[in-house]
């Protein structure tokens, strides 16, 4: 970052001084398209299809000659290197070294171009020829750390030895995107920033995004003059350099380093679970560089550090969750015992307070109030209860109550933090946990309210002073941890379940008395129902038998046929009745099984000559009893019609199929007889139409070639069932 910010951005449409004067200005600075590189390296922009250098920056002429622009890349990387670029989708790709001074050659893809970076190597420097040793030692060192503080301290020491920089800081991002130096290693003759905070504007949003993509960045000399990009196409000056290590940095950041008396800097990203946890920030008082191989060694050690950070944080979180679970189990056992609610509140109040490490606790149950520890005055608690219930949330928590309830400023010394549970019921129960104000004195590296300065007639500049600047934070308590909030959620369910169990227990006692009185009546009723069902079944069987006797006694063939049809129709109804009251359910039956039994009875009544003539393919399908009666009558009528009209009363094959199609059933009756023979307007036909209509279904007649096919389709849940 430089004082003359506009001058450094001649190749861009927007300069930092055009962005405004507020503290979020740096969030809008296009640092990924600076239009220039740092002069310690070189950049080539290559079209891999043609193998042509279409742009570049830096002292390329000293390596490739004065006519390098528009020339071939083959002289630098050869046919093998060009083949790699043409066959590779993304980067980075290490193409080896070149030149008498030995330059590392690394390529990254941007759109249809390859961006090739050339930088001096550093043979013999730490992390260059012994990268595996450094990575192994780093892993062993990190594994011996006892906690997060010890781990970051060890990391600062390792990176200080590896990079050789005067000051190495482990910088952690906080929830508000500000940062804190949690560990540091520095030369004895320069000051440190351990435990100092830095405002979020020091590392703007787009810079944090680039730290995830390009995980090691070096500024070897903060007094460098940017080397602009030139190209066959002038628009190449705006190429995205997000993945380029030699990318020029924001002039505001360069000035920031100068204000800190830093001549060279390096930063290594600490990425945990895909998120930027922090940085290894390195400063040096004189120019200093890290080669590509050194940067890669730093990146791999930082990845190992991130894994150990995750392990340490997860272990601490596990111990906290285990403590909470153990306390919850003990409370659950006490809730399970039969206590008077008012007595229970007094017994467990202090346990509930300790559970969430609160300074005070209040339980309000209707007009009854119980409290323990240090809590606000009674009238203040009443105001808090009213406000909590007005929020309409089962669980509410804050570490700065006065920001949401201004009246809490008066008692913030006892209740700056609040966690509340509201159990919705006829008699509301509200639990309040309070945490006292925790006075915090934050050491800032310079005044955070002057992170970016703007004076009349002068361009935008970063703050010039990084002297310790103290700020006292009032009205805040220790925040509720995610594990504590989850425990509170579980506790709300536990309390609700305990309350419901007590209410259910009371209701059960009342119901038990009522059920005992009614058991005898129910037994009598069941006996009567069984008797009635038995008599109905006997009556139906008796009528069927009478019809069979009458049919056998008559000499009139037409009357005998009609009596036989009536017998089969009544058998369909009787079969459903028998099926319903011989099984556990009295509302639904298996239609496939019912049809199978019905056809078996029909075949026996049709005579021995019909044996084997009825073939079935029936899918299991549950249907209401009323609908089953109607389906049975439809089936009987279709079989009677096939017997009567298809074969003239003589035996012949009849195929019956039942299948489920989405939420409908389809019943098909097909014969191989003489086909359609005149109009049918008799009783059976009229009854058939009425039954299909009651099923809210349809019936279709089609040619079976030979014979006829009747298809009945209807919803499985008939209108009467809905």
Image (cartoon, rainbow, N blue to C red):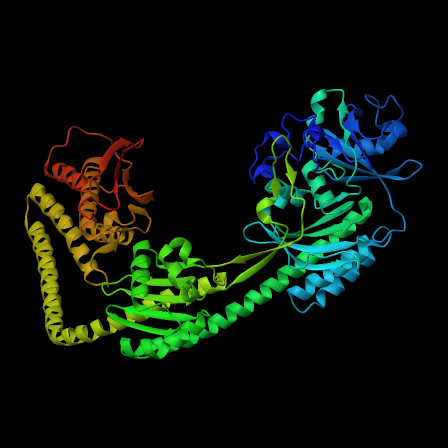
For image coordinates 80% across by 43% down, the residue present is: 220
Tell me what residue is drawn at x 62 percent, y 28 percent: 14
Q: Residue at x 21, y 56 (%)?
A: 587
Reply above or below: 327 against 424: below
Residue 686 x %, y % = 12, 37
Q: Judge whether 382 appears above or below 290 on screen.
A: below
Q: Is residue 631 left or right of residue 416?
A: left
Nearer to me, 88 or 710: 88
Q: Is residue 49 visible?
A: no
Residue 235 percent across, percent down from the top left = 69, 22
Residue furthest out toward the right: 100
Residue 697 visible: yes
Instruction: Tally the marks.
Output: 0
Q: Is residue 469 left or right of residue 525?
A: right
Instruction: Please say if 599 is above or below 355.
Output: above
The answer to whether residue 349 is above or below residue 165 is below
In-front residue for pair 361/494: 361
Where residue 258 sits in the image (x, y, percent)?
74, 43
Check the picture and name the quadrant holding the N terminus. Answer: top right
Which percent across, then down, holds residue 608? Answer: 23, 51
- The quarter of the displayed image where residue 635 is located: top left
261 or 67: which is nearer to us?
261
């Amino acid at each position: 970052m430089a004082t003359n910010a506009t001058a450094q951005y001649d190749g861009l449409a927007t300069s930092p001084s055009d962005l405004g004067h507020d503290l979020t200005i740096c969030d809008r600075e296009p640092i990924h398209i600076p239009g220039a590189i740092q002069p310690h390296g070189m950049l080539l922009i290559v079209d891999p299809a043609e193998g042509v250098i279409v742009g570049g920056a830096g002292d390329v002429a000293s390596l490739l000659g004065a006519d390098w622009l528009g020339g071939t890349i083959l002289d630098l990387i050869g046919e093998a290197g060009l083949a790699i670029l043409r066959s590779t989708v993304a980067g980075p790709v290490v193409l080896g070294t070149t030149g008498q001074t030995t330059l590392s050659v690394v390529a990254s893809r941007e759109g249809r171009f390859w961006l090739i970076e050339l930088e001096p190597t550093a043979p013999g420097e730490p992390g260059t020829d012994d990268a595996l040793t450094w990575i192994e030692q780093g892993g062993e060192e990190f594994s011996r750390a006892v906690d997060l503080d010890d781990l970051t301290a060890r990391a600062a020491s390792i990176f200080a030895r590896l990079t050789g920089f005067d000051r190495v800081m482990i910088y952690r991002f906080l929830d508000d995107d500000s940062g804190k130096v949690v560990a540091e290693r520095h030369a004895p003759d320069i000051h440190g920033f351990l435990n100092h905070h830095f405002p979020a504007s020091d590392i703007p949003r787009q810079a944090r995004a680039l730290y995830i993509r390009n995980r090691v960045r070096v500024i070897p000399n903060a007094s460098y003059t940017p080397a602009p990009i030139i190209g066959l196409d002038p628009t190449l000056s705006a190429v995205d350099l997000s993945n380029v290590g030699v990318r020029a940095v924001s002039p505001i950041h360069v000035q920031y380093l100068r204000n800190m008396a830093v001549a060279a800097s390096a930063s290594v990203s600490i990425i945990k679970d895909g998120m930027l946890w922090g940085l290894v920030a390195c400063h040096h008082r004189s120019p200093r560089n890290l080669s590509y191989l050194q940067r890669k060694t730093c990146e791999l050690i930082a990845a190992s550090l991130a894994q150990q950070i995750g392990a340490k944080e997860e272990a601490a979180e596990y111990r906290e969750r285990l403590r909470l679970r153990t306390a919850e189990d003990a409370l659950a056992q006490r809730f399970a015992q039969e206590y008077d609610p008012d007595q229970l509140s007094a017994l467990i109040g202090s346990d509930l307070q300790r559970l969430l490490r609160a300074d005070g606790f209040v339980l309000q149950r209707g007009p009854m109030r119980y409290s323990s520890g240090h809590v606000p005055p009674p009238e203040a608690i009443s105001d808090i209860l009213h406000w909590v219930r007005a929020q309409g949330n089962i669980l509410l928590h804050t570490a700065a109550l006065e920001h949401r309830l201004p009246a809490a400023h008066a008692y913030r010394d006892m209740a700056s933090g609040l966690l509340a549970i509201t159990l919705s019921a006829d008699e509301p129960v509200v639990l309040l946990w309070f945490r006292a104000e925790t006075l915090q004195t934050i050491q800032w590296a310079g005044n955070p309210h002057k992170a970016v300065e703007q004076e009349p007639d002068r361009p935008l500049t970063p703050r010039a002073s990084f002297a310790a600047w103290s700020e006292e934070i009032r009205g805040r308590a220790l925040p509720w941890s995610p594990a504590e909030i989850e425990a509170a959620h579980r506790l709300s369910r536990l309390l609700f379940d305990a309350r419901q169990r007590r209410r259910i227990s009371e209701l059960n006692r009342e119901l038990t008395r009522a059920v005992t009185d009614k058991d005898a009546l129910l037994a009598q009723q069941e006996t009567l129902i069984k008797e009635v069902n038995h008599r109905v079944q006997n009556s139906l069987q008796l009528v069927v038998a009478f019809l069979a006797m009458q049919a056998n006694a008559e000499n009139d063939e037409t009357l005998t046929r009609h009596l036989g049809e009536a017998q089969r129709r009544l058998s369909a109804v009787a079969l459903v009745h028998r099926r319903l009251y011989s099984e556990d359910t009295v509302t639904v039956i298996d239609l496939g099984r019912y049809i199978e039994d019905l056809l078996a009875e029909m075949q026996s009544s049709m005579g021995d000559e019909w044996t084997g003539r009825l073939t079935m393919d029936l899918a299991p399908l549950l249907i209401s009893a009323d609908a089953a009666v109607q389906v049975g009558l439809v089936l009987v009528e279709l079989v009677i019609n096939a017997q009567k009209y298809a074969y003239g009363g003589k035996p012949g094959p009849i195929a019956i199929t039942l299948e489920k199609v989405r939420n409908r059933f389809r019943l098909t009756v097909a014969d191989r007889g003489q086909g359609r023979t005149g109009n049918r307007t008799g009783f059976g036909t009229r009854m058939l139409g009425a039954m299909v209509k009651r099923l809210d279904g349809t019936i279709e007649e089609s040619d079976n070639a030979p014979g006829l096919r009747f298809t009945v389709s209807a919803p499985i849940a008939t209108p009467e069932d809905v």
